[in-house]
Amino acid sequence: PYIKACYSILYVLTPEETRAELMILKTAQEMKRRIKLWSHTDGFKTPGTGKDAGKMVSIGDAKDVDPVIALLQLRDSPKTDKISDIIVMRDLHMFLGSPTQPNAKPVRLLRDISTLFKKSGDTLIIISPIKKIPAELERDITVIELELPNREEIQTIFASLYTPQAKKFIGEITPDEQERTIQAAMGLTFGEADNAFAKAFVEYGGFDKEKKALEPVSKLVLREKAIAVKKSGILEYFEPKQTSNDIGGLENLKSWLKIRSKAFTKKAREFGLPPIKGILLAGPPGTGKSLSAKVASHILGLPLLRFDIGKVFGGLVGQSEAGMRTAIQTAEMIGSCVLFMDEIDKAFAGMGSSHSTDGGTTQRVFGQFLTFMNDKTVPCFIIATVNQIAGLPPELLRKGRFDEIFFVGLPTAKEREQIFKVHLRLNKQIVDDSSALFQECIKLSKGFSGAEIEAVVISAMYQAFDQDRVVSVADLVDAVKITNPLSRSKAAELKGMIEWAKANAVNASKPDPEEETDSGTGFASAGRQLQF
Ligand code: ADP
């Protein structure tokens, strides 16, 4: 539509160069317009005719590979007929300089061309995976983003591969399984979806011949997606194995999630339940926030998509926003998932101060994130975690942003007992957990986080292994005694967080009245209690 609307310079933002070119080629044919393709290695090319039909043939000469010469040609060669041209340029973004330091000659030439093409009806299309437009050009260029393929397009790719021959090789795939397979490829680019299907078909066929248990095609496609998504560096897709039994305590959080586990069904939508946004888990490190996200994925029956927001800021200025955009787009296409954003305080805390040094990039990325949270139409459930509250932008914590903010504090006595038992079981250790010494151990470990309790269990195992015997409760007690928990070394920080939580968050744990009377630390009582 943009070509038809006679925009003179378009900037197509996409990692899928070939797909964009094919789309443009098709449009050009439909509109009976001449098309030229330029790249920094081959200069100008055009689709061949006659015996060269179906191929691209070179036009112009070797000097055209120089972007300035190429642009000069576009500007200065006189037209001999009335057919308007579409010129597609790859690689050009690399010669424009940066938004703040433009490259004078190409920028000047593009501005001239913009004016000229407006009159002639020609169109110049720049294809680039990253957005890098000098401020001088912003008014002359229209940016469009090539979206990831939608369900229909993915279905077409699937159909084009699931041919009668393929059917013969891999056998019938039931309509239900076809649906799941197509859903599994959502969020992939055209090329990736094509590859994922092809590879899944080959593996599926192979399994069949060896008469091994068949894995559903959709599972194989999901595995391919996991690999493809990971390549982006920002998202990671997996199906965690942890269940409710692997987490000690945090009963309030677990009940909250269980009640919402049906919220993602069609029935819930028909009932009129509002879409779920997500939750924020705040608390000191090692208290099981990440673990909760994995367990949530299990409780809600949704796969986990880990969104590494720290990596968004790895690259150059400008690329952060592009990275964020791609990641959000992919998450939206994947749809049903738990979107797990760990330690977002690392990215967004102290935004005020970094503002001056990064040209507002953090601020803009944060804006993108908030917009996504507000506007997302897909059932993807955000679980964000923070280790500290100080310095977080208030917009993030505002009422209504998240469905709930949970404070995940240090475990109560009951919870510590459960966490000890979880890690003893996971590590296949049996100790006398009905002994008085075990109770003593739980008391002594007051102020320990779940991660610290796990470390105690491991350290007791080393001790016992070294002395060639089984682990005893005494080993656990020894390990507890020599540990200096974070709550002791960072007491002041913790206290601040607890104060904040009392006013602003819901406690992820059920309170433990015994614990509250035996000391005044207030860990157990922080946070409002949950009301269902
Ligand atoms: P956080 O994200 O809060 O920093 P993690 O979830 O990464 O903490 O915790 C690290 C590890 O500590 C977990 O993988 C788990 O083995 C252990 N752990 C922490 N809290 C709990 C808990 N409540 N129950 C069982 N294990 C826990």
Image (cartoon, helix red, strand yellow):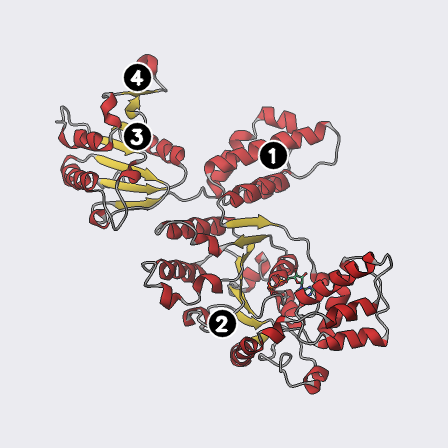
The reply to whether callout 4 and callout 1 are in contact (CB within 8 Å) is no
* Residue 133: image location, x then y, percent: 27, 46
Residue 40: numbered disc:
3
Task: Please say if 210 is above or below 293.
Answer: above
| Alpha carbon distance from label 2 to label 1 | 45 Å
Q: Secondary structure at mark 1?
A: helix
* Residue 37: image location, x then y, percent: 29, 28
Q: Amino acid at mark 3?
A: His
Residue 49: numbered disc:
4
| Alpha carbon distance from label 3 to label 1 | 36 Å
* Residue 34: image location, x then y, percent: 25, 27
Pointer 2 residue: 389
Task: Please say if 359 is above or below 529.
Answer: above
Mark 3 burial class by Cα count in 10 Å: few <14, some 14-19, many 20+? some
Q: Earlier in the sequence, mark 4 or mark 1?
A: 4
Nearer to the camera, 13 or 72 = 72
Task: Please say if 60 is above or below 132.
Answer: above
Q: Amino acid at mark 4?
A: Thr
